Amino acid sequence: MFKRKKFKLRLPSRTLVLGERTLVMGVLNVTPDSFSDGGLYLDSAAAVARALEMERAGADMIDVGGESTRPGADGISASDEIRRILPVLEKLRGRLKIPISIDTSKAEVAEAATKQGAEIINDVTALRSDPRLAQVAARQKVPIILMHMRGNPRTMQKRPFARDVMRDVSVGLRRAVGIARRAGIPKAQVVLDPGIGFGKSAAQNYELLQKLPELARLGHALLVGTSRKSFLAKVPGAAQDAGRIWGTAATVAASILGGAHIVRVHDVAEMVGVARVADAVVHPQSVSARAAKSK
């Protein structure tokens, strides 16, 4: 079993220790067209209620996004994205006790969000769409998550897939890290995401999960997001539940055993339970230690 390295992620309000236990990132899509929960939280009051609900369920952070990146999605302007997310960030400020990540590929949106309390930038294009995001992260002194995507949301599942997915992901992420470092972001403030489901075949998604330890050799903390994605339904004989929750649970556990520090999920309460059991497999000694403290 792969032993994940520990990292300290420095946020404006606190320091997150990565590697002692898996951190769970709750997904909050403030969009009309995201693949799983589009339209459910477009209203800011509903979005705030959902964020607080995920916090109560055990989320360690909330990832707020105002633009869908599902396969085939069209992009929106920075002003439209800001108009969707700012009311949510404003209403959560002071109420949410866990940090907020802003899921955006636009520097203008990241700038506005960090001024409203967002403490992590999550860029699904790994700085290909807008390299200025790295400058925002450096200036605001917030960590940045760099995710690999082959192509863009409109084309990523239509273009030819890479012949060697591990090489494609590794090369792309190394390039992105170089941009981030040149912008002045410390190495420890960069988290990498292999981009499960973004321009990969079903088999390649499973290969990436199998080979996560190879990505860990790049020297950064890892985030993995498999939640509810379509590749989970491509395995013959797998449970075909509506929310793909069983497939998500299996891949969350596999991600943790492969070295993931953060898992990004929709079903927070369920996946917190999965993460804690997987963590117990990684660190068996922690089970007796926690049991002793609870007495």
Image (cartoon, rainbow, N blue to C red):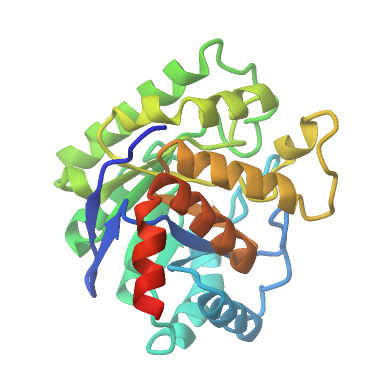
Q: Position of residue 68 (x, y in %)?
A: 62, 54
Compared across the picture, whether 287 is left or right of 232 comes to left
Q: Residue at 53% of width from left, 55% of height from top?
A: 277
Q: Position of residue 22 (x, y in %)?
A: 42, 55
Q: Give above or below for 151 relative to 283.
A: above
Q: Residue at 60% of width from left, 49% of height from top?
A: 75
Viewer-side residue, 82 vs 17? 17
Q: Position of residue 5 (x, y in %)?
A: 27, 42
Q: Give above or below for 187 relative to 216.
A: below
Compared across the picture, whether 169 is left or right of 251 comes to left
Q: Is residue 65 visible?
A: no
Callout count: 0
Q: Position of residue 180 (x, y in %)?
A: 24, 41
Which quadrant is the C terminus positioned in? bottom left
Residue extending farthest top: 163
Viewer-side residue, 242 vs 107? 242
Q: Give above or below for 114 relative to 48.
A: above
Which quadrant is the N terminus positioned in? top left
